[in-house]
Image (spheres, rainbow, N blue to C red):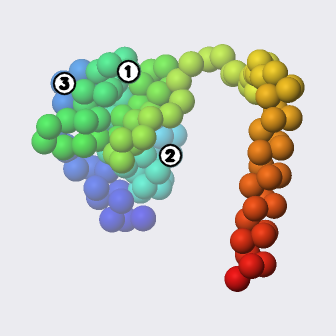
Amino acid sequence: MEPYAAKARDLIDIPPNSHRLYDLVKQRDGSKYSGAFYYALRDTLVAPSTDLAKKIAYGKTKRWRVVTLDGVMIDISGTMAGGGNTVIKGLMSKVTCDIDPKEVDKMSDEINNDQRRLEEISTDK
């Protein structure tokens, strides 16, 4: 873990209005686990808002991994995850579809007819 501990001590040039997450972590045992903390956090930056996080993450000169104070994380690859405090689940059970049963029967008949035609073509060869 020593190479990571050494990288953790490096000073990096970060965008304005952001902080390196590693520097914000207070370690109880001094620098005993600094390599492990740096390995997990790397140079992740903390931004106060999602708008600022996007500007930082998709920077013109360098891409950054950024996390916001409300939990949104933007990875170096550009993926964005998290945020919000309300868990939304079970919405699929509320989805309804207004299709006429006669229309469904008609489509089913068409599928069956197409399958029969396909079988006839296959057996004729």
For the residue carrying disc 1, how many other residues have a C-alpha within 10 Å: few (<14), some (14-19), or many (20+)?
A: some
Q: Secondary structure at mark 1?
A: helix
Q: Nearer the viewer, mark 1 or mark 2?
A: 1
Name the N-terminal-most of marks 1 and 2: 2
Identified by mark 3, the residue type is: Pro
Nearer-the-camera pick, 37 or 17? 17
- Determine the CA span between mark 1 and mark 2: 33 Å
Nearer-the-camera pick, 63 or 117? 117
For the residue carrying disc 3, how many other residues have a C-alpha within 10 Å: few (<14), some (14-19), or many (20+)?
A: few
**Residue behind mark 3:** 16
Q: Are marks 1 and 3 in contact (CB under 8 Å)?
A: no
Nearer-the-camera pick, 51 or 107? 107
Q: Nearer the viewer, mark 1 or mark 3?
A: 1
Instruction: Indicate left or right for 113 with 8 as reference.
Output: right
Count of numbered labels shown in the rendering: 3
Q: Are marks 2 and 3 in contact (CB under 8 Å)?
A: no
Q: Nearer the viewer, mark 2 or mark 3?
A: 3
- Determine the CA span between mark 1 and mark 3: 15 Å
Is any part of residue 47 visible from this angle? yes
Identified by mark 1, the residue type is: Thr
Location of residue 30 in the rendering, given as x and y in whole percent from the top left corner:
44, 45
**Residue behind mark 1:** 50
Residue drawn at the location 36% of the way across and 59% of the way down: 4
Identified by mark 2, the residue type is: Asp
Location of residue 52 in the rendering, given as x and y in whole percent from the top left corner:
29, 21
**Mark number, residue 29:** 2
* Quadrant position of residue 65: top left
Name the N-terminal-most of marks 2 and 3: 3
